[in-house]
Image (cartoon, helix red, strand yellow):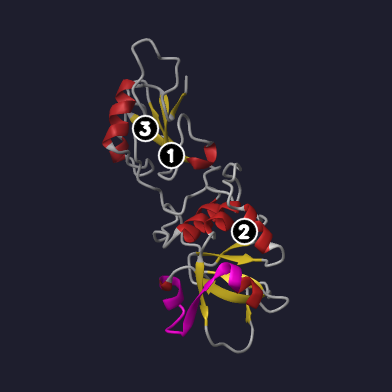
Amino acid sequence: MSEPGADASANPEVLAPPEEFVQAARLAPDHRLHLADPAWQGDGQPPTWAVVGQWRSDAEGQIVEWEDDEDYRPSPEAMGWPEPTDDVDRAVQLAATGYGPADDVTAAWQGLRARCWSRRTGTTAAPDGTAVVPVYTSSCHLQAVGQLGFELVPVADLLGRIPQGHALCLNSSAPVSMVVATHGLADVLREAAEPSADPAGEPQEGAAGTLRTTTAPEARRPEPLRAPSAPGPSSSERPLRQSEASR
């Protein structure tokens, strides 16, 4: 921990705060200023799993300490994953990181025409040995596995062509892929037309299938998109937006 009044920029253990946080600290001595993941767009105080960490200001309004949040779950952006190629890819990324429900993946499949290999012999298997049929929602993911012949097939039609005992492997070359059990999937797709009310939570196994991370880059701290607001003259006991009083 740094000495009170020390300059955070001179302390290598303190993550350099953006200028807006420095200014907020001057207006809020002896407070903790939370840095939220850029993916969190909710109102009010973000949940602990969406907080990267916090800076602490001393009695003089100087930032003197940074503390990582143990409950933080990096978003796709913080993981360094590329921009999603489509709605399905976006839903898979959010579900894998806990920023969205797995049911959103099937909802995004409505009307989708998937890319599948037009000629292939043998059986493709997932890492756990499950026999799968690889399908891709974007040509970018398909090209990542090679220049292979493919055809565009509506998902509803594709389900009737899946060999018995096989599952779908969605975007196997993407940062996060999804193995989808086909049993009952047609019914799930019909029901998925209604928006899901489930809140974001832990990476999960939903009705659609099982999320599997195929690539796990080291998470990086995201750049903040907004700073906490300054407290009023008589609000020394009131926490800041995105901050917590430490007194």
Question: Up-down: is 46 above or below 221?
Answer: above
The magenta segment is 140-157
Q: Is residue 215 magenta?
A: no
- Closer mark to the observer between disc 1 and disc 3: 1
Q: Is residue 146 magenta?
A: yes
- Closer mark to the observer between disc 3 and disc 2: 2
Q: Which residue is mark 3?
A: 64
Is residue 75 toward the left or the right of residue 7 in the image? right
Question: Residue 186: horizontal and vertical position, in percent?
Answer: 66, 63
Q: Rounded to the nearest whole Å, what is the CA distance between mark 2 and mark 1? A: 28 Å
Secondary structure at numbered mark 2: helix
Determine which of the numbered discs, if any, sits on residue 41 in the image.
1
In this rendered view, identify the residue nearer to me: 118 or 136.
118
For image coordinates 73% across by 76% down, the residue present is 165
Quadrant location of residue 9? top left
For image coordinates 33% across by 11% down, the residue present is 233
Q: What amino acid is found at the position of numbered circle 2 in the picture?
A: Leu
Q: Which residue is mark 2?
A: 189
Question: Residue 50: horizontal and vertical position, in percent?
Answer: 49, 41
